Amino acid sequence: MVSRFTELGIDCADPAALARFWCAVLDYEVQDEDDGIVTIGPRPDARGGSRPGPVPPTLTFAEVPEGKTVKNRLHLDLSPADRGQDEEVRRLLDLGARRADVGQGDESWVVLADPEGNEFCVLADRRP
């Protein structure tokens, strides 16, 4: 037996706002919203069925009173699916991300932070 990665929980100050940001980034939709917790996940395909292949994990945003204080120990790596890295970085900045310096130096990936300061990377060449 093995386990599957199905959900990532993210503590935040404003679950609805952060969920909207990540829905736009990942083309996800809100799947559940209740009392300070918002869960988002992949949209069904146009035929109404599920996507072929592995199921991407859902993201659950939970409201917590404390703010983020240090660099994330865990972060998302994004691979642009239909555009180049530079164009995707511009799109994400327009959605509300900002550039982040976590001491990465001159690398092939770009480090950004979401509207609550959670770092994530946009990779150059890796395709899912």
Image: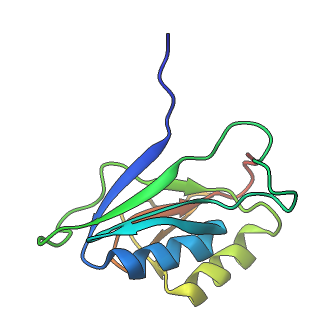
Q: Is residue 26 or residue 69 the one in the foreground?
A: 26
Residue name at image x 63 percent, y 66 percent: 26
Q: Residue furthest right?
A: 47
How many marks the image carries: the answer is 0
In the rendered view, does 80 fall on the left or right side of 33?
right
Q: Is residue 53 above or below residue 104?
A: above
Q: Is residue 124 above or below residue 18?
A: above
Q: Is residue 58 above or below residue 114?
A: above
Residue name at image x 74 percent, y 78 percent: 87
Q: Where is residue 63, by image quadrant?
A: bottom left
Q: Does the image show residue 106?
A: no
In the rendered view, does 126 fall on the left or right side of 65?
right
Residue name at image x 39 percent, y 70 percent: 101
Residue 2: percent from the left, percent from the top? 49, 16
Q: Where is residue 89, by image quadrant?
A: bottom right
Q: Is residue 113 or residue 2 the one in the foreground?
A: 2
Residue 62: percent from the left, percent from the top? 28, 64
In the rendered view, does 115 fall on the left or right side of 62?
right
Q: Is residue 4 above or below residue 22?
A: above
In the rendered view, does 113 fall on the left or right side of 31?
left
The colour scheme applied to this rendered structure is rainbow
Query: If the image is split into quadrants, where does the C terminus sit?
Result: top right
Q: Does the image show residue 19?
A: yes
Q: Residue furthest bottom?
A: 94
Q: Where is residue 122, by image quadrant?
A: bottom right
Residue name at image x 50 percent, y 79 percent: 20
Residue 33: percent from the left, percent from the top? 40, 69
Q: Is residue 108 or residue 113 the one in the foreground?
A: 113
Residue 37: percent from the left, percent from the top? 32, 66
Q: Residue furthest top?
A: 1
